[in-house]
Image (tube, rainbow, N blue to C red):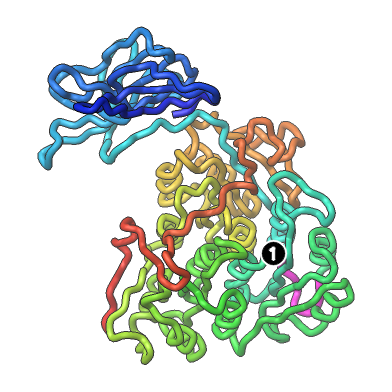
Amino acid sequence: MTWAGVVAFQRNINYGCYDNVGIEVYDGTTVKRVITNGEQPEFSPDGTKLAFVRADADGKSQIFTANADGSDVKQLTTGPRSYANPSWSPNGARILFDAHTSPDSGDAHTTEYIDVASGELTKVAEGQGSNPSWQPLRKNITARVWGDDEYATAVASSRFSWNTVGKTQPGLLDAKSAVLVSQDDMADSLTAPALAGKMSAPVLLTPKTALSTPVKNELKRMLKPGANVWMVGGTSVLSSNVATQLRTLGYVPKRVSGADGYETSVKVAAVQTKSPRYVFLASGKDYKAALPAAAAAGSDGPSGASTLVLSSGTTLTASVKTYLNGLNPDKTMIIPVGADAKYALTHTSFTKWPSSYYYYPVTSGTAEGLSVALAKFWWTTPDTATLAYAGSWRDGVSASAAMNIYGPILWTSRPALSSEVKSYLLRESAGTQSVVAFGNTGSVTLGALNTAGSSISANGNMFLYHADYNGDQNTTTATGTATGTQGLRKSAEAPTTPLKGATPRSSPTSPTTPAQPTVKPNLDSLKTTQHQ
C-alpha cells in the first residue's frame, strides 16, 4: 500500500526456527519496521493510520489499526471468525474486509465492514468474492460529442480524438491516415472502425459522389499530405471522383472493396492482418451486433491482430466462408457476436477445419445486452465507456471509431439508460472514470448520460459533464448546464489520466506465442465445442 510516496508492505524475516512477519515502511530513502507480527497493511486515506491483520491468541486473523509509525495498536475485530484484506473507506470511518468462519470447504464467507469508532459490523449485501475494496471518491467525467447532424458528429468525433497537424493537445493522438465511408451506405461502413483502429485513423462520412466541405476541412486539419486515406467500398459506394479529390488534396487514396459488403469485410480483414489471432463474426444486416464487434476488432490499435468479417444474417457468403476456412480454429479464436452470426458459423461446414473445434459465442436477447456481453468478454476494467443510441448506425460508427482503443461501445435506448448498460457500469465503477456519448440529446438523452455518470460514481454529485459540440470542448456541471469553456482534457477536476490518453484495453487472452492464444479461466463459460 502506498500513500504520498511512502510504501507500506509486509516482510518475513527468517530467524532459523521461525519466521517473523512484520510491516515495514519505505519513504524513498530508508526502510523501517513499524509493526511486529502483522501483515496486509493498508494506509488510511489521510495517511495517518494503518489497518492490518494479526493473529490473536487463538490463531484467528483479526483486523487491527495503528498509527502510521506503528504506535497506538488497537484490535477492531474479535471472536471465532477470521478476517483478511482490510480496505479503508474514502473518509476513513470504516474498514471493509473478508470474513471467514472456517479455513476449509465449510467456510461461510462474507464481505463486511466495521465502523472504526463504534466497532459495529455490517454485512455487505450479496457480498461474496475476495479482496474487496472501496471505490475512491473522485470526480468522474461524462461527455457528449456531437454536431448538427450525424455527419457532423463524425467530424466532431475526429476533432475530439485527433491532433491538428503540427500541434499537440493533451489526450489527443496524431492521425496516421483516415478512413472514408459513404454516409448513405451502412453495409460497407460496418468494418470501418476496425480498420481505423489498426491504421490510427478517424472514420469520416461523406456523400457518394464527392467529398463534403466539412470532410475536406477535417482531413486538412488532422492529416499530413502524403498520408493514406482508406476508401471502404467500390465506386458504386464512393465514386472515382472522391479518389480524384483526395489526390488533389495531396493524399493517397487506398480503396478496399469487394463485390458486396461481405466480401469487402474480407478485404478489410486482409488489410488489417494476414495472421489474425481473433476473428469476430457478426451479421452485416445487424449493425447493432457488427459495430460493437468492429470496435473490439480495432481495439488493439496498430499492433492488433483482430479482424471482423460479416455474415449475411444466418448464412455465410462464399467469400466469408473461404476466409474462415483458411484459418485454423486451434490457433485463431473465432468469436461470433449475436445469434445470427453464431447460427451462420455453426451451420456451415468447413472442410479444412477439424471435426470438432472451439469457438466463443457472445449473444444476448437485446442489442443493449449484446453490447454489454461483448464488453464483459473483451475489455478488462476499461477506464472509459462509450454510449450511442441503438437507433443510429452513423453515430455508432463515430463512437466505435473514436473510442475503440479505450473501451467498449454500449448501445442505449431512449429516453432512459438501458438497464443492462446501467448494471454493467455499476459493475465496472471502480475502474471506469468516464462515459462519452456520441450524438445529440435526441439520441442519447441527458437523463441517460446522467444515469451513466451516477453509475460510475459514488453518487450523482461526483461527476462532471462536458459538452463537446463540433469537437470544441466545454466544461459543464453534473446536471449538464454549461458553466464555462474549459477543455475536457484540461479540466483540473478531470481524472489524472486524460480521457483520450486513457489506458488502452487489456486483451482477454495473453498469447504465449504469436499463433497460440492462452485463454484466461474467466472465459471458460464462453468456450464452446462444435462438432461438424
Instruction: Specify whether 105 is left or right of 530.
Output: left
Q: Nearer the viewer, residue 288 or 82?
A: 82
Residue at the right extreme?
248
Q: Position of residue 500 (x, y in %)?
A: 64, 48
Q: Quadrant of residue 64?
A: top left
Tag 1 secondary structure: loop
The reply to whether residue 386 is in sight is: no
* Residue drawn at (29%, 61%) of the image: 525
Quadrant of the image for the C terminus?
Answer: bottom left
Quick check: 133 above or below 360? above
296 in magenta? no
Question: Around disc 1, counting alpha carbons within 10 Å, would you say few (fewer than 14), some (14 to 19), or many (20 or more)?
Answer: many
Instruction: Specify whether 227 is left or right of 81.
Output: right
Instruction: Specify whether 445 is left or right of 372.
Output: right
Q: Quadrant of residue 36?
A: top left
The type of residue carrying mark 1 is Ala
* Residue drawn at (71%, 50%) of the image: 172
Q: Which residue is mark 1?
A: 201
Most common SS among magenta residues: loop
* Residue drawn at (45%, 52%) of the image: 380
Quick check: 322 above or below 489? below
Q: Position of residue 401 (x, y in %)?
A: 62, 62
Range of magenta residues? 201-211
Q: Position of residue 28 (x, y in %)?
A: 54, 25
Q: Nearer the viewer, residue 118 or 152?
A: 118
The reply to whether residue 121 is in sight is: yes
Quadrant of the image for the N terminus?
Answer: top left
Quick check: 238 above or below 27? below
Q: Position of residue 51 (x, y in %)?
A: 36, 20
Total numbered labels placed on residues in the image: 1
* Residue drawn at (50%, 43%) of the image: 432
Q: Quadrant of residue 9?
A: top left
